[in-house]
Every structure is written in structure tokens, then in C-alpha cells.
Amino acid sequence: MLVELGHILLIAALMISIAQAIIPLIGARKNDTALMAFGDRAALLQCLALTGAMAALAASFIYHDFSVKLVASHSDSETPLLYRITGIWSNHEGSILLWVFVLSVYGAMLPIFGKSLPKTLKARAIAIQGLMSFGFIGFTVLTSNPFERLIPAAYEGAGLNPVLQDPAAAFHPPFLYLGYVGFSLSMSLACAALLEGKVDAMWARWLRPWVLLAWSFLTIGITLGSFWAYYELGWGGWWMWDPVENVSFMPWLAATALVHSILVLSTRGSLPSWTVLLAITTFSLSLMGTFVVRSGLLTSVHAFADDPARGIYLLMILGVITGGALLLYAKRAKMLQAHDRFEPLSKSGALVVNNLLLIVLTATVFLGTFYPVLQKGVFSTDLSIGRPFYNITFVPIMMTLILVMGIGPHLKWERDSGARFKSLSRNSALVLITGLAVGFVTGHSWLASTGIAVGLYLIVGTLAVLWSRRKILGRQTAAFFGFVLGHVGLGVMTLAITLLTSGEMDKTKRLGLGEQMSLAGYDFTLTDSAQGLRDNYQVTSARIMVSKGSQPLWPLVTENRNYPDRRGAQGTGTTEAGFKMGLKDTVFVTMSDPQPEGVIIKVNYHPFVIWIWLGALMIALGGFVSLADRRLRSDPKPSLQDASRPS
Amino acid sequence: MRILLISLLVAGLSLMAPPSAAAQTADTPSISAEEMERRSKDIGRQLRCVACQNQSIEESPAMAAQDMRFFIREKLEAGLSDEAIIEELHKSYGDFILLKPPLKPSTYLLWGLPFILLLGAGLWFWRAVRKYSDDPA
Amino acid sequence: MKKALIPIILFAVMVAGLAWALMKGDTKTLDFAGQGKIIPAFEQTELFDEARMLTEADVKGEISIINVFGTWCPPCAVEHPVIMDIAETGRVRVIGLAWQRNNSREDAVRWLKRLGDPYELVIFVKYAGLVSALGVTKAPETYLLDKSGRLIHRHDGQMSWQVWEEDFLPLIAQLESQ
């Protein structure tokens, strides 16, 4: 009964979204307040309906309703409560419901928080959100109904994929969606502004908090995914340039460019058409991601659905939404012809360079992700594009960007002096050379030393801006501190990645009980090996005692688990690595199935790995901190003071 | 500024020294075993595990990857060079097994585009700057 | 041409490309790169007789199929009756490659006792490089070889009678007429 209710609510949301897409749009054109207000209510109602639908599905999972196909396929009677809840989005249908739910939540933000928006702009944005909702809810109802019944009901469920029974994996999708579905607002506000015919500093200020919010969530989502992959997938890889990782990274890169573009537009009033285009592109990349993961176009450990029919539908949605937006842009672009003045030696100039580089980076990742599809289609051969490709293309361009990031924030908004630039460059060179020296002296290769130098340079360069304002820190805006956190976070990540890549070591050896192996100054002794049954899986495990010299330090346990399918079919296995993560050293241990001659143990040493994620979290925190900036609140009047304040 | 640089040097030196290779030679018996280890890792890092997504066979725990690592060891013992071994696997599995896409006419676009775009961006910036700084408005 | 039309044009091209790729269908099975090459030299034991060594010479001389299976692989068990049927037709020599990895010789022997043994001979392999030399990506896979040991065709995944009739038989007929 509950599930039918959920289904009805879903269809109701569909109906509401059509109305939401049409009526406020008419209202905006006619300047009819009542019709526009309808949009506000529709958006709120749609969100309410989908909340109800989500709740219905959640209840089915929580109360083990195996008459619901989804519940029967993705949980069983032994599944712990947490994973019954997170199991909702562990599959295609449930996650697309989550997707449309988050979309409606962001849509509801417009009536709730958008009171300072001009009525027509708001109405149009709500209408576009409605249109997008219509497309996706339609997709859900027609091809991916999460409320489908299983008749007759199963007596037991199939269980949740064991690889997903993990907190980081469980929360990774919601954060990702709060991120890239959030960019829907950038799309609707961009289209609304184009319809209004006005893209200016005011618009940028309205857009900014939403982009920052979504961007920060996306940063966390990607970080969670990386962290989870590291410890769960058994080999300590934190980024594989897997197509599905890439499709979440591309919107992030574009959104970063957007955030900076918004900065220029909101303070200087320049780059309007660029900003609008970026706003459209960012969400399009989110849509591409959704399409790729569910269409079966690319193989991946992540890929949800393998269904070309679904793929076509999603491609159509992508085509209509982005195509429509870009057509609108083509028509209205002339209106946006602001005089994009910028001096090269200025903060504006640096931000333009920043954007250009980020776009090239996005295009590079795009190329690496989709080229194999092209190759397969045209030449019928398979191509792999892995880390070596990105190391040669992405990394150097990223390094260039970081070099710009060190100097850019120091420059004045308008033309800065050549002399000042020279002095900044000199200091930069000094820091870089010092960094290189540190690298060489501590025994690192050329490449690693460059990475160290660049990472240190970014941290020092950013802190130097902080230092230069030490006497007026009280007067700095939240956005300023957000900037410091964000850029330092990136510097920390750069350092961590460099040190990890150059310092990581591993060793594999067959150990009998009591035997040991050594790596990176640590000794690893096999103290126990066992097999058994636990919770909802079978397990073979090994206990390793890590010691340094004669001092025992940490007992680690590593396991291979087999989760049998409760209905008797073949089960799935996972590897649970044993690891000890420290601020500097991290050791990581995995095993292969024990033989009478002993267990094959693989030991990894990963220095500084934790700083990759800590750095990324700093970036996310920077985004959230920037949100606190009072200037971004419902402040309808941009003050001239803002234009001249050094920021 | 100077204080900053000096403190940087000190911090860096204390944190970043990678553990010396000597620390781990306690149980590696002969030079050729070490070399085998090193070369098989080098080769392994360049080859894609066919059963997984974009991981190298060195990183992947999948059994298909393990098999390939054995193949590499067999061939190293037989005295083949790194390139010869990679080429043999390349012949069996095609371009797919190479993590670094080979440079050939069908991949010129792939390798070229990032740098062409970079150049293009640079050119655009150059022209935009000249255009607007000449503009008296 | 208006500069503002560039984004939409680029986008349209991209969507067209993606649609075409989707339509084309199977973007995921790997193409058989080793096609046309002769089976490499190898030396492995026979499954049932540890003392007997098999080499590449043992798979040459007749048109054969090599069926790669493992006891750890459920689809291999599912396809096995089809292999039995193929062996019964007597059209080609049916050779098995027991790719056992972590599992034992005894496991494979038991498996075949239970499900039936259609093979003229079975090459037993745990982790050998033969698997990589052939270009095996997973189990089950079935290879078609001609008399000189040349790899003619590979079927990725479970064998079915339909695949046998539609893909293998025409090729076999061609080989027989040579």
C-alpha cells in the first residue's frame, strides 16, 4: 500500500512539474504576479511529493518489504539498518529517485531563499527547473520505476552488494548528488537570465551561493569516493581515471571555473557571456555523467545500468536541456556584449587565465574519457587511456595553473604595475627553487621535486596573501578566508600526491605462521590465519603484527570475505585490507587465500596519503566558509564600495 | 620572507625524507631477484588489467592480473627485455592492454588536442589582451 | 557565422556521436587482438595425468576448439552441457583448458566427473603465462583453431548452441574446405 502511495506521489510530482514548467513562464512573459507565484507553490509542492515518495521507498527497505522488487534485489533479512537505508540508492532505480528528489529540493530553494530575486527571473528559473524535473521524473516513471512490485513476493532478499556495505560507499552518492544535481540551479538561473536578457553583476551574486554550495558538496562526494576506493578495493588506489570518476570530476573542474568567473562578473561586471556558458556547461557535464553511468556506454566498476534504451532516453533529455540552453544562448548572446576589458597584469587577467586553463583541463579529461568510444566506433579497436596519458597531459597543465594561482591573488584587480609583478615573480622563483632544493636534498627525483616545489609554492603564496593583510584581518570577508582555505587545501593535496607517488612501496611474500617480512623500516609478522563465518558472510583472515625494530606497534587484520547469495546462488567476495593510517606513514596489508604452504601477504607503504583527502576536505571547507559571506545574502543593492575593496 | 624560506627548508627536510632503500633489503637475497621485482613492477604499471577498469596489473588484486604478473615473471626469467614482453602481451590483447595509448595516426587527435587547446587558449588570451589594451575606452 | 553558434554546433556533434555509439550496440566486449596468430609454444601438464606433458604440438594437426573453464566460474558450469553436445557431434576436436588459479587439480577433476568430460585432452593451468599468451580475459572463453594451431575465432563468455551454429560452424566449414 505504501509503495503504491509512493508511486502515486511520483506521478503527482510529474504532473506538478509540467505545470511548473509552463505556467510561471507564461506569467513571466505577461508579468502576471499570480501566475508567477504559482511557480513558487508548484516547486514546493513537487518537493513535498517527492519527499513522500522517498519516504515510502525508505520505509519499504527499512521494514523488509520483499514484495517490492527493489527491496528484494538489494537487501535481505540480515542487512543492517544503515545499509537498508543506504541501499535505497545502491541501484539504478532508487538512485534516480534520489536524483529527482535532490533536483526538487534545489528547485524548492528558489521560492524559499530566492526572495530577493526579481519576480520574473525567479519565475523563469523555477519553470526551467520544472522542465528538467519533468524530463527526469518522466524517465523514472517510464523506464526506472522504483516502486515495482514483485509478485509473488520473495521470501528472502538477494542482499546488498557487499562492496557497498560500508559507510563511505553508502554516503558517497548523496553527497555527489547534492553536488552535481545542485548545478541545475546554475542552468536554470542561466537560462532565466538569458530569457530576461540581462546577465550582470547582480545575477552573478544571486547565482554564487548555489554554485558554491553544490561545488562544496561535490568536493566531499568525490573525496568520499576516492577514500572508499582506497581502502575497500584492496590495492590502495585513490584515483584511477576510471570513466565514472572522470564524469564526476569534469563538472567539478567546470564549476571551479564558474566560481571564479562569477567572482569576476560580480565584482567587475565583465565576462557575462563566458559565465553564462560555463553555467550551462557545468550542469551539462553533470547530465553527461548521469547519462554515462546509466547507459552502458562505458564499462566501469561503477556502472549502474546497462541498458541502451535508458541511454537513449537520457541522451534525449541531455539534448533537449543543453541544446535548448545553447540555442537560447546563440539567440541572446549579442545582448551580453559587455566590454570585456582586462589587463594581463591584473587579478582579472589572472582569473581569465585560470578559466582558460580549467577549460583545457576539463577538455583533456573529456578527451581521455570518451576517446575510446570514438576509437571503438570508428576503428573497432579497443583503446585504454590510463594514468600515463593523464600524467603527460593533465598534470603539466595543472602545474601551470598552480603557478598562476600563486601570483594571481596578489595582483590588483585593475592594472597592476610591471615592477610589482617582477618582484612577485622573483619571490615566486625563490620559493620554487627552495622547494626544489628541499626535494633534491631529501632524495627525491626531478619530477617529485617539481611537485614538492609547486605544492609548497602554492601554500606559501596563498599564506603570503593572508600575511599581507594581517593587520586588517578583521575586515576581511568570509570569501577571503574561503579562498585561503581552498587554495592552501589544493597545495596540501599537491604535496601529498607528490610525496605519496614518489615514496610509495610495496612487497609481496608468502608467509607461514610466525614468519615476517620488512618494508619501509617496518616488520610485518603473520601471527594468525583463520577461516570462519560471521554476520552475513564467510571470511578468511590473517593477523599481522606490525613492528618497528623490536617494538610491536599495531596489530592489523586483513580479510577476504564471501557474501553468499541467501537464495543459494553464487556469492560475491570482497577484500578488506588491514591498514593503519597515520599522519605520515600509512601501512596497508592484503592477503590472498591461504594455502597449506602459507598465506601470500602483500604489504603497501603509503606515506602522506591521508593528506590527499584532508587537503580535499580543506577545499570543501573553503567553499562552505565562503558561503558565510554576508555580501552574498539577500543584499539587493551592490555597493560601489565592493567594486573598489581589495578582495 | 627569509624567515619563511628558512622555516620551509627546515620543515621540509624533517618531514620529507623518504625511507631509505637500505631499510628494506633485510630479506632480499640476490641482485637478480631485486631486479626482477623492479622490472616486473615497471612493466606491470604500464599494462592494464583486462578484468578491471583502468587499473594496472601491478595495482589490481584481480586474478586475471595475477596471471599476467606470472607471465611477466616467466618471460623475465627467460631473459626477454621489458619492451619484448610488453609487445608480446600487446599482440595477444591489442592496444587495450596498454595504459598509455600508443601514438599512431588514430590517436594523433587524442595526444594532440590537449596541447592544441592549450595553445589556442594562449593565443586567444594574447589577442584579447592586445585588443582591449589598445582600446581607449 | 555567429561566434555564439559554436557551442551549440559542437554540442550537436557530440550528441550525434554518442547516439551513434549507443546505437552501434556492443561497446564493451574486447575485440580479439590475437586473431590470426599461431598458438604460442607452451608446456603444461595434462589434468588427469600429472606425468604427461602437453605442448603446442598437441593442439595442432586437427581443427580444434579450446574451451577455457575453471571450477571457480559459475557460467562455465552453465555452458558445460553445450560443450558436451559439441563434442558429441564429433565435428571438431574439443580440448579443455582448466584455468584453476587458486583452486586445485583435484577440484577440476571432480568438477568434470560431476558435469561430464567432453574433452579429448585437458590442459591444466594454475597461473601460467599460457593464459596471457592466448589473450584470455576471463572464463569461460572458447577459441577456434585451425590445423596449424592458428587462432581463428574466440567466443567471449558462455557458449550457446546458437553461437556454435551461427558463428563457429560456418568458419569450421570454411576451414574444412581448405
Image (spheres, coloured by chain):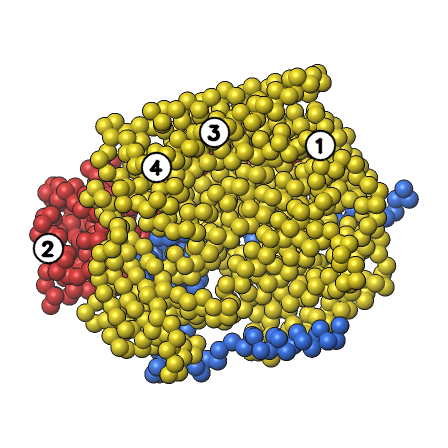
Chain colours: A yellow, B blue, C red
Residue A235: horizontal and vertical position, in percent? 39, 61
The residue tagged with tag 4: helix, strand or loop?
A: helix
Query: Cβ–Cβ below 8 Å for labels 1 and 3?
Result: no
Q: Which residue is mark 2?
A: C110
Mark sitting earlier along the chain (1/3)? 3
Q: Which residue is mark 4?
A: A61
Three-letter amino acid code of the residue under disc 2: Arg
Q: Which residue is mark 3?
A: A50
Residue C81: horizontal and vertical position, in percent? 14, 42
Tell me if mark 1 has few (under 14), some (14-19) or many (20+) residues whose alpha carbon lies within 10 angstroms of its own.
some
Mark sitting earlier along the chain (4/3)? 3
Residues indicated by labels 2 and 1 sit on the same polypeptide chain: no
Q: Quadrant of residue C122?
A: bottom left
**Which chain's residue wears label 1?**
A
Residue visible at 51% across and 53% down in the picture: A223
Three-letter amino acid code of the residue under disc 1: Ser
Mark sitting earlier along the chain (1/4)? 4
Tell me if mark 2 has few (under 14), some (14-19) or many (20+) residues whose alpha carbon lies within 10 angstroms of its own.
few
